[in-house]
Image: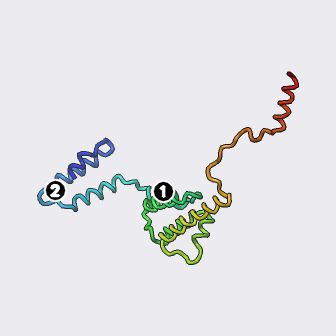
Amino acid sequence: MAFTLTLIKGPDIAGWTRNMGEVLDALDPLVDNIPAVWDQFLYEFSAQFQDSQREGRARQKLENLRMKFPDIDGYISQFEELARQANYTQGNNETIQFFIRGLSRPILKDVMKVPFPHTYQEYKERAVDSTKSRQIIEALTGGWTGPPQRTNPFNNFRFQQNTNLRQNFFAQN
């Protein structure tokens, strides 16, 4: 604890480190050198410097999070990080409801087909499988063409116009 306090610097934190140093000085190093002292220090540090609004912001972002097809991996990654920040348990029903509410409608329809999934892992696997399946179907049927292709600007120029221009050019010479 003493070593950690020597590393914490700055005018905004000087009063807190001084107070913690006084608490440390009051302890007997032979008797009080126990893990509970360190645990108490971590608790005090968290209480003093933790972002008190972090959970609320994460919950708000989680409520508004929506999957953008076909980025299921990005959606899952962001969902799980926000759920962790909001202190939601991954497998509880509320967390699962947030997850399925954010899925795109076509993916949600696939995920909710019988037999119904029961765990978060099952919902997640179905969402991934559905997204992959839809990508393949759209690629095969031409619904999703992938990245935009470069076009030739001369494709729109009519051959007939070229012939007329060429005839006019030669007629002048």
Q: Is residue 130 above or below residue 51?
A: below
Q: Earlier in the sequence, mark 1 or mark 2?
A: 2
Position in image of residue 168 (x %, y %): 86, 28
Foreground of the two, 52 or 168: 168
Residue annotated with mark 2: 27
Task: Name the residue: 12% across, 60% down.
Answer: 31
Residue 111 is marked as none
From the viewer's perspective, tell me whether residue 123 is left or right of residue 157.
Answer: left
In whole angstroms, how far apart are the C-alphas of marks 1 and 2?
Answer: 39 Å
Mark 1 Cα shell of 10 Å, populated few (<14), some (14-19), many (≥20):
some
Res. 13 visible in picture: yes
Residue closest to the far bottom: 115
Q: Which mark is residue 57?
A: 1
The mark closer to the camera, 1 or 2, is 1
Amino acid at circle 2: Leu
Nearer-the-camera pick, 128 or 170: 170
Q: Position of residue 21 (x, y in %)?
A: 21, 50
Q: Is residue 60 visible?
A: no
Q: Residue at x 69, y 43 (%)?
A: 151
Disc 1 residue type (three-letter): Arg
**Position of 5 relative to 109 (above/below):** above
Residue that extends furthest to the right in the rendered view of this protein: 171
Q: Secondary structure at mark 1?
A: helix
Q: Quadrant of residue 131?
A: bottom right
Question: Which residue is at 24% across, 48% downward?
Answer: 5
